[in-house]
Amino acid sequence: MAKKIFLETRSEPTLFTLFGISCHLKDFRLSYLLNKKLELEFVKMEDFREYSFYFCRDDDRYNSYYLLGNRGQESILISDLKQTDYLMLVEGPVKKTQKDHLLLKIREIQHILTAFEVRFETVKNFDQILTDLEIHLMYILKEAKIKYSPLKKQEALPCLKI
């Protein structure tokens, strides 16, 4: 009889920080206000499943920011957080002072009702969501990649800005 090997995939919870945001704003308005207040540059990406998806990379702090809508047309991404409208996932090292600063700045935005840090233990399917989000982002980046043809001397390489 063949042996079965089970691989366990776990993400490191210390490398991710999750914030819940409750507000009545549209996703594009919230991303604009977060860009202004946090000095980030969120960019609209192809929707993750049916949920709005924005992405930003901060090379100075070695962090990546994901802004996800928690509500779709007919479902909720994380059913444990029914009162939360948006999720902001920070990938990379985040110190406690930086977390507090982010929460304070988010709460200062006029139309935000509340913002809070979400503990990973309270979210049942968080590992699966992280895996799906990573696959989705890889798919987007693969689609956006430019395939080069042989260049002539006068042609310059095009830039790809995501």
Image (cartoon, helix red, strand yellow):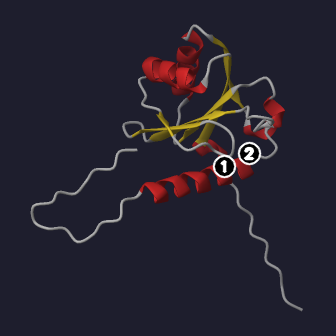
Q: Name the residue under label 2.
A: 126
**Quarter of the image where one finds residue 147:** bottom left
Q: Residue at x 79, y 77 (%)?
A: 5
Mark 2 crowd level (few <14, some 14–19, many ≥20, 10 Å Cα): some
Residue 54 position (above or below residue 40): below
Relative side of 142 to 136, left or right: left
Question: Which of these two is toward me, 128 or 12?
Answer: 128
**Quarter of the image where one finds residue 89:** top right
Q: Distance between the residues labelled 2 and 1?
A: 6 Å
Examine the rendering and report whether any part of residue 153 can be seen. yes
Question: Which of these two is toward me, 66 or 92?
Answer: 66
- Taking the view exactly as shown, the residue that stands out farthest to the right is 1
Q: Where is residue 3 in the image (x, y as percent from the top left)?
A: 83, 85
Check contact, mark 2 vs mark 1: CB within 8 A. Answer: yes
Residue 160 position (above or below residue 77): below
Question: Which of these two is toward me, 123 or 134?
Answer: 134
Quarter of the figure with the N terminus: bottom right
Q: Where is residue 39 in the image (x, y as percent from the top left)?
A: 41, 23
Q: Name the residue under label 1.
A: 130
Residue 9 position (above or below residue 45): below
- Residue 103: mark: none
Quarter of the figure with the C terminus: top left
Relative side of 15 to 118, left or right: left
Q: What element carries label 1?
A: helix
Relative side of 67 to 74, left or right: left
